[in-house]
Amino acid sequence: TAEGFEAAFDAAVAADERIEPRDWMPEAYRASLVRQIAQHAHSEIIGMQPEANWISRAPSLRRKAILMAKVQDEAGHGLYLYSAAETLGTGREELLDKLHTGRQKYSSIFNYPTLTWADVGAIGWLVDGAAITNQVPLCRCSYGPYARAMVRICKEESFHQRQGYELLLALSNGTPAQHEMAQDAVNRWWWPSLMMFGPPDDESAHSAQSMAWKIKRHSNDELRQRFVDICVPQAEALGLALPDPDLRWNEERGRHDFGAIDWAEFREVLKGNGPCNEQRITQRRRAHEEGAWVRDAAAAYATKRRAGSVP
Ligand code: FAQ
């Protein structure tokens, strides 16, 4: 019976068991997972653009090789995630179409420009750092395929975070001009990185339900706080300042207090009015159109293989 299925689902979630693709699940659970996983997948592939902007201008062969590997990893993460969404019964074509027509979101962070080489370091340190803080708990998400994709993604994100940190450290300890460039990048990326965790808890539409379903394990504000606490000593070690005059240790809470986030800016970026929204989506659509021949060729090959006419 329907009640029996629902009870089995509730019991599995309560017991911290994984829900798998063939298991019964509430339609709203399925829809919320598709929403989050699709947004996550779109973020990975749109997120290739800001850093790819610097591949041709990386300052050495070593840096270029590292950056190319990182951007390729992001494409791979997108593929793991689209595959996870497919296990819920939504095709990749449909999801991409929703991205291209503005019906599904991607992370606000990728609508900011990469103005200097130091931005590659700041993205690795802060953006990948925020991503890891948010994604490590998702490795325990109640939906099996998403949780398992997260395990692999987090391992690679850790490498990404270290490369950004190491890049910024080199610049910070470099010439005064390099140090200044690193500081300027941190100044520009700090606040948008805090916005990656989503709206404050009292404005987060999905948090309560997602936490009850154990899709999310912590609230947006809790993870944001965790990230701030992680970054403060790292910034000190880098010799770079975080651009927040209100940032200070709160002995009583045992955590850092920090300044107010500009949520009006966040809402504008979500509405499509960030500095690079238009550029990102135009580039994405063009890449999709230019890749049509690859999809056609792969489909033709698959058809021939099924017919046995090619090995
Ligand atoms: N940007 O009710 P909530 C990466 C939307 S890391 C845009 O709190 P929820 C790695 C939200 O979707 C970045 N939209 O929502 C990388 C919802 O809208 P909807 C990707 C945002 O789901 C590094 C509405 O606001 N990571 O790509 C944002 O409970 C470097 C209400 O919000 C993930 O996606 C935002 N920042 O919590 C790649 C992680 N925040 O759907 C390349 C997985 C919120 O009703 C280079 N996702 N919204 O239309 C999550 O953990 C959650 O979905 C949150 C939002 C925490 C993002």
Image (cartoon, rainbow, N blue to C red):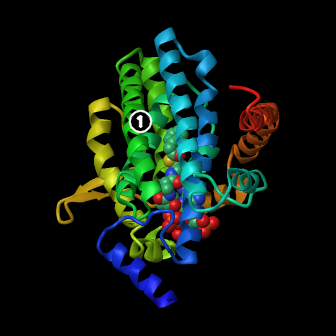
Above-or-below relation of 303 to 134: above
Say which residue label 1 marks.
156
Q: Secondary structure at mark 1?
A: helix
The answer to whether any part of residue 263 appears in the image is no
> Residue at (44%, 76%) from the top-left corner?
208
Specify the quadrant of the image occupied by residue 273. Answer: bottom right
Above-or-below relation of 2 to 301: below
Specify the quadrant of the image occupied by residue 53. Answer: top right
Q: Quick one: 231 or 134, which is closer to the camera?
A: 134
> Residue at (58%, 52%) from the top-left corner?
107
Query: In x, y percent, where is residue 229?
Result: 29, 51
Query: In x, y percent, where is residue 221?
Result: 39, 64
Task: Note whether ligand 1 is within 8 Å of mark 1.
Answer: no
Specify the quadrant of the image occupied by residue 138. Answer: bottom left
Name of the residue lying farthest toward the top: 61
> Residue at (80%, 35%) from the top-left corner?
296
* 216 left or right of 263 in image: left
Query: In x, y percent, where is residue 147?
Result: 41, 55
Q: Quick one: 34 or 55, which is closer to the camera?
A: 34
Query: In x, y percent, where is residue 195?
Result: 50, 55
Please tell me how crowded label 1 is: few (under 14), some (14-19), or many (20+) other residues with Cα within 10 Å: some
Q: Amino acid at mark 1?
A: Glu
> Residue at (38%, 31%) from the top-left corner?
159
* 293 left or right of 119 in image: right
